[in-house]
Amino acid sequence: MTGTAGAGAGAGAGAGLAAGAAFFAAGFLAGAAFLAAGLAAAFLTTGFLAGAAFLAAGLAAAFLTTGFLAGAAFLAAGLAAAFLTTGFLAGAAFLAAGLAAAFLTTGFLAGAAFLAAGLAAAFLTTGFLAGAAFLAAGLAAAFLTTGFLAGAAFLVAGLAAAFLTTGFLAGAAFLAAGLAAAFLTTGFLAGAAFLAAGLAAGFFAVAI
């Protein structure tokens, strides 16, 4: 039975990776277009130097000093379930208020450790589609419930850092699967609203 479960998990992971690959093969340039528009703007609204200092000193270090699996257990089993059992808006309220506050109340390193280790690993432990459903609904709502600047602050820092610390391909694998699903689960216009306004000039601002 254990072997069967392992095989199922492997198949799920394979399907997720295949979905990510399909996203890149079919629409990398399109994805880069909306990503570039978002994080670049975020850097302009918060100040480029301030954002860069935060990323370089905070999140990058957090990825190196913490492990993904520890945070994954909590996020995958806890937050993902919270979204399903309490409804997206209630779960989003917790996510937006909790993560955003974590950065302010515990300092950047602590907040980054939780966000970086958790969200990235959540995709691996729950499967791309399940993780994407939770991430897309939560972050999209976070922008609406906390306001653009507040939501962008923690989102930009976390995702952009993933590219620096895990390597471009690894970060892209998790990001592509999540964002692609976000468009499907929230609707194109709704997904584009928060993505174009808040996600990855990390393709540009970070890679450069």
Image (cartoon, helix red, strand yellow):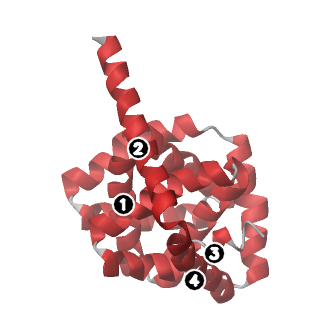
- Residue 76 in the image: state x and y as whole percent: 39, 42
Q: Which residue is located at x 37 percent, y 80 percent?
A: 144
Q: Are circles 1 and 3 on residues that touch, CB within 8 Å?
A: no
- Residue 61 in the image: state x and y as whole percent: 75, 51
Q: Mark 1: give few (<14), some (14-19) or many (20+) Cα within 10 Å.
A: many
Q: Which residue is mark 4?
A: 37
Whichever of labels 4 and 2 marks the residue nearer the N terminus, that label is 2
- Residue 63 in the image: state x and y as whole percent: 68, 47
Examine the rendered structure and indicate whether residue 183 appears above or below residue 37. Answer: above
Q: Which residue is mark 1?
A: 181
Q: Amino acid at mark 2?
A: Gly
Q: Mark 3: give few (<14), some (14-19) or many (20+) Cα within 10 Å.
A: many
Per the image, label 2 sits on a secondary structure element best described as helix
* Cα separation between marks 4 and 3: 6 Å
Per the image, label 3 sits on a secondary structure element best described as helix
The residue sitting at the bottom extreme is: 45
Examine the rendered structure and indicate whether residue 79 appears above or below residue 105. Answer: above
Q: Which residue is mark 3?
A: 201
Q: Mark 2: give few (<14), some (14-19) or many (20+) Cα within 10 Å.
A: many
Q: Amino acid at mark 3?
A: Ala
Whichever of labels 4 and 3 marks the residue nearer the N terminus, that label is 4
* Cα separation between marks 1 and 2: 11 Å
Q: Are circles 4 and 2 on residues that touch, CB within 8 Å?
A: no
Whichever of labels 3 and 2 marks the residue nearer the N terminus, that label is 2
Q: Which residue is located at x 46 percent, y 43 percent?
A: 17
* Res 196 visible: yes
Q: Which residue is mark 2?
A: 16
- Residue 136 in the image: state x and y as whole percent: 37, 63
Per the image, label 1 sits on a secondary structure element best described as helix
Whichever of labels 1 and 2 marks the residue nearer the N terminus, that label is 2
Q: Are circles 3 and 2 on residues that touch, CB within 8 Å?
A: no
- Quadrant showing the C terminus: bottom right
